[in-house]
Structures are given as C-alpha cells and as structure tokens.
Amino acid sequence: MRAGTAEATTGSRFALEAGKLEPRQREQAILREILAGNIPGFLRTLAPVPLSYQPPQGKLLRATIFVMPEYLAIGSDQDYLRIPMNLYTAAAVAGKLGFVLPTRKMVNAIYAHSAFHFSPEPMTPGPEMRSTEYYRIHNQKIEDQARTLGIQPGALVSGDKKDVVMTNLLALNPGRIAIYGWHKLDGKPIQPLSTVHGACYADYSHGIRLVSASMLVNGETKSVYDVLQDPELSKVLSDEGPIPDVRESLARLGASSCGPEGPPLQPFTVFAQRKPR
C-alpha cells in the first residue's frame, strides 16, 4: 500500500517481517512494497544535479539529471528503511518506474553537489552482511548521523551507501552486479567500480539511487537512454563513453529474478522535479 495510508508497512515493520524471509522471498517483498508506492514521500521530489563535458573541439555540454535525494527506502517519512536489493530487483524497479541506475560519473556528481555528506559506517564483514538485521542496524547508524548533522528528509545527501550502477562492464561480465562509491569525507570512494559479486548479491552497504530517465542537455529535454548511446553526448553522463541499450538491458534484467516470481505488480507514478538553481 502507498506510504501514509493506514495499511502501509512502516520501515521498522518491514525489517521485522523481512527478517523471517529467505533472500529470494525478501527481494519479492521489496519489489511488491516499492511498486505499490510504499516509499517515503520525500523521495518523490527529485533533486537536480549538474554535469558537464568539454569536447576537445566544440561547445561545452551542460547537463542536469534529476535524482532521488536519498537511497531508495520502504516506509513513511517518519519510519523508513533504506533497502538494498539485488540487480534484478533494482532493474525491475527502475524500469517500471521510469528511472535508470546511475553511472560512475553520475555518482561522483551527486556526491559533489550533495548538501550533506555522511561518513561511511562499515560493519563487520561476514555472512551476516546480507541479513535484514544488518540492513536495520546500518539504517539506524545513518539515522543517528542524520540527527547529529541536522539533516532534514528531502535534502540531497550521499556517503551513506555504495551505489548499484550502470557500466559497460556488465555486458562483459553477464550475471554480475556493478557497485561503486561510498565516498569518504575526503571525497574518495571506498568502493572502486567492481563486478566481483553475482547479480543476486546484495548486502547492507548497497543502495539504490534512482535517476529520472528524462534530463536536460544545454537546456533541452532529452532521454538518458538516448544520451548514453550517443558517441559524444554520452560523455556528459559517462566516463566510459557510450553505454548502449540501457533501456533494453534494464527490461531484460527486470524480467529476470533469482527465484520464482511473485504475483503481478503495478507501478506508481507520483514524482516531481525541483528546478535547477
């Protein structure tokens, strides 16, 4: 159910219920909650993030992407759980809701333009990293920092999670998930771009930052999919050059899963974009 209704599951309640599930069942539960609209209201107002690229010859490209101000979460503004998910679930969410996953260059730009930076909170490595209890504990650590820093929900923030990202490495390493980021306060990422884990992998340190599929390039509205395929324009969004067939890749990945599919799911569509400053 949509967040804010009497039937909606709070973040703490979801953590309790998901803790009883196997990983495959938990992924299905995550997908059901998010596509039913059960996310905090503040995530629905997207933040503008500027990027640029100067061709060796030619006009400076200036772009603006619109991103969720925080990592995807389940619950209400008062009680929410930042929720990691595997690549298949992340792709399904992004594709069904009209979003894309960020590139490494986008992640760096989001960090550079964030109003607040969290200090990363690594936890003891081990099998428990993938547990819902680790998700809950790490979420509480971030909440404690937010109170200390005086962060209000809706501010553009970063540094609290690694990003699941789009990269050409996914085509070279099928069946893998790509992660990057978790920047320290000095601006250096803890996690270099990596595809070491399988696509079904998720742990407490991962976050899903959704980026609108619509963007601005030199003031003109364009599709992120089209820009990423363009040999020149792609450089404003990607430090790898063109990333082709992103729409098709998200659709293909989103139609896959690590286990039996749940019942049919319906998306929601209420998002607004803050105007660039």
Image: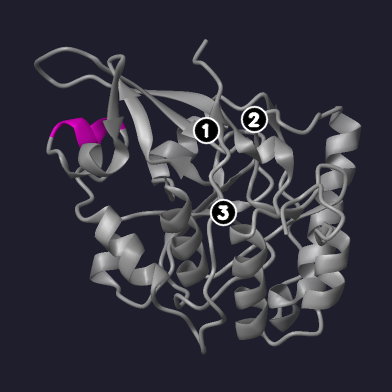
List the residue tagged with mark 2: 156
Does 216 appear in magenta?
Answer: no
**Mark 2 crowdedness (10 Å alpha carbons): few <14, some 14-19, many ≥20:** many
- Whether residue 141 sits left or right of residue 275 in the image: it is right
Q: Secondary structure at mark 1?
A: helix
Cβ atoms under marks 2 and 1 closer than 8 Å: yes
Magenta segment boundaries in residue numbering:
232-236
Sequence-earlier tag: 3 or 1: 1
Percent coordinates x, y for residue 172 in the rendering: 24, 69
Would residue 234 be counted in the magenta stretch?
A: yes
The residue shown at (64%, 59%) is 36
| Dominant secondary structure, magenta | helix
Query: Dot 3 surroundings within 10 Å: few (below 14), some, or many (20 or more)?
Result: many
Say left or right for 135 vs 165.
right
Q: Looking at the image, can residue 178 be seen?
A: yes
Res 229 → quadrant: top left
Mark 2 to mark 1 CA distance (whole Å): 8 Å
Q: Mark 2 or 1 closer to N-term?
A: 1
All told, the count of numbered labels is 3
The residue under the point 45% across, 75% down is: 199
3D distance between C-alphas at marks 3 and 1: 13 Å
Residue 213 quadrant: top left
Depth check: give the residue in front, 206 or 14: 14
* Residue type (three-letter) at the residue carrying disc 1: Ile
Residue wearing tag 1: 110
Q: Which residue is mark 3?
A: 208
- Pick whichever of labels 3 and 2 is earlier in the sequence: 2
User: Is residue 118 visible to the viewer in this orientation of the structure?
Assistant: no
